[in-house]
Image (cartoon, rainbow, N blue to C red):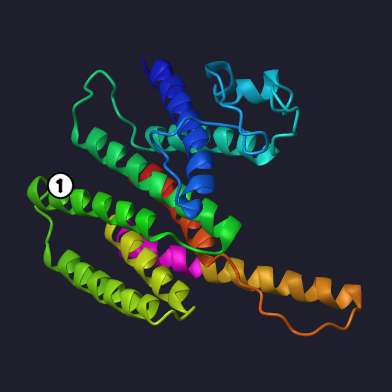
């Protein structure tokens, strides 16, 4: 039974990975991600079912579109594998006895996977566009609200800490809205703060602390590497602001620490 569930969660993750690539491409363009049929972004040909099987379609089509023969970026293939592995590891981290499916751990597992969906999409869009979409933040907040209701009702956790986070979130959303109304291009910082609140609600203070700490370390290493590359090139250029995908770093590290934490406590 355990091996069957491992396969199921890997396949589930791979299918979600395929959806993440679609969402990362369409959400910034304000396109529908649920009802509009999948199509090749190069030739706009609608994709058949055989073109949409995660991992296997890429292998059988040799990384090319069946219709226009345009190369498909390998990152789509890698993301499907990675999301499958993440879903599998997260499921195994709970050490669930699958002979008793309806347990507290199962509910937390499902909420966690829905939460991971938000992090994957936020990370993907931020890596590509250096921006965080409000709609995805809103989805993440909804998952957090469901999580708060569950842990406060069934686990009888103190609600006051969560209330403080929600007040902070409301404040950040109001500031973000005011900034957008004035058409200022400084709302990325506010959206990072909103993301941190979402992470803190679901992950708790300790994991959030490690998420922020290792994000800062990652940023420092990235900046150091960029600085070394510039010196090696020996080309004098005007100083340009390099916008780092901080949301991407936060999401990736938070996923890693949530999985590690579960393996330690369960």
Residue 21 can be seen in this image: yes
Q: Residue at x 61, y 20 (%)?
A: 56
Q: Secondary structure at mark 1?
A: helix
Q: Is residue 261 above or below residue 237?
A: above
59 or 41, which is in the foreground? 41
Q: Residue at x 75, y 34 (%)?
A: 71
The dominant secondary structure in magenta is: helix
Q: Position of residue 161 (x, y in %)?
A: 18, 68
* Residue 222, picture quadrant: bottom right
- Considering every residue shown, the one lying at the far right of the view is 234
241 or 51, which is in the foreground? 51
- Check the picture and name the quadrant holding the C terminus: top left
Q: Which residues are magenta?
A: 203-214
**19 on left or right of 202:** right
Q: Position of residue 112 (x, y in %)?
A: 33, 43
* Residue 58, picture quadrant: top right
Q: Position of residue 34 (x, y in %)?
A: 39, 36
* Count of numbered badges drawn on the protein: 1
> Would you name the residue on which mark 1 appears?
150
Q: Residue at x 43, y 17 (%)?
A: 3
Residue 60 on the magenta span = no
Q: Position of residue 194 (x, y in %)?
A: 35, 68
82 or 154, which is in the foreground? 82
- Neighbor class of circle 1 (other Cα within 10 Å; few <14, some 14-19, many 20+) is some
- Check the picture and name the quadrant holding the N terminus: top left
- Considering every residue shown, the one lying at the far front of the view is 44
Q: Residue at x 36, y 78 (%)?
A: 181
Q: Is residue 42 above or below residue 50?
A: below
**113 on left or right of 130:** left
Q: Is residue 27 above or below residue 62?
A: below
**17 on left or right of 64:** left
Residue 264 can be seen in this image: no
């Amino acid at each position: 039974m355990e091996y069957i569930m491992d396969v199921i969660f890997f396949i589930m993750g791979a299918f979600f990975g395929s959806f993440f690539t679609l969402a990362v491409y369409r959400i910034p363009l304000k396109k529908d991600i649920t009802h509009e049929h999948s199509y090749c972004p190069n030739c706009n040909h609608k994709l058949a079912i055989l073109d949409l099987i995660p991992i296997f379609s890429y292998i059988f089509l040799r990384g090319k579109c069946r219709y226009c023969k345009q190369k498909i970026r390998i990152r789509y293939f890698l993301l499907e594998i990675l999301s499958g592995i993440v879903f599998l590891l997260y499921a195994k981290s709970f050490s669930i006895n699958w002979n008793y499916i309806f347990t507290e751990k199962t509910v937390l597992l499902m909420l966690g996977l829905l939460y991971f969906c938000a992090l994957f999409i936020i990370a993907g869009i931020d890596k590509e566009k250096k921006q965080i979409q409000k709609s995805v933040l809103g989805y993440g907040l909804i998952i957090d609200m469901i999580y708060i209701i569950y842990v406060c009702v069934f686990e009888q956790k103190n609600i006051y800490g969560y209330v403080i986070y929600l007040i902070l979130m409301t404040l950040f959303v109001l500031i973000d809205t005011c900034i957008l109304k004035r058409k200022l291009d400084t709302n990325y910082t506010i959206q990072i703060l909103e993301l941190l609140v979402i992470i803190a609600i679901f992950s708790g203070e300790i994991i959030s602390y490690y998420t922020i700490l290792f994000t800062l370390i990652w940023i420092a290493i990235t900046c150091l590497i960029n600085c070394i590359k510039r010196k090696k090139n020996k080309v004098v250029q005007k100083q340009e602001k390099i916008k780092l995908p901080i949301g991407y770093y936060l999401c990736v590290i938070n996923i890693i620490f949530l999985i590690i934490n579960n393996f330690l406590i369960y």
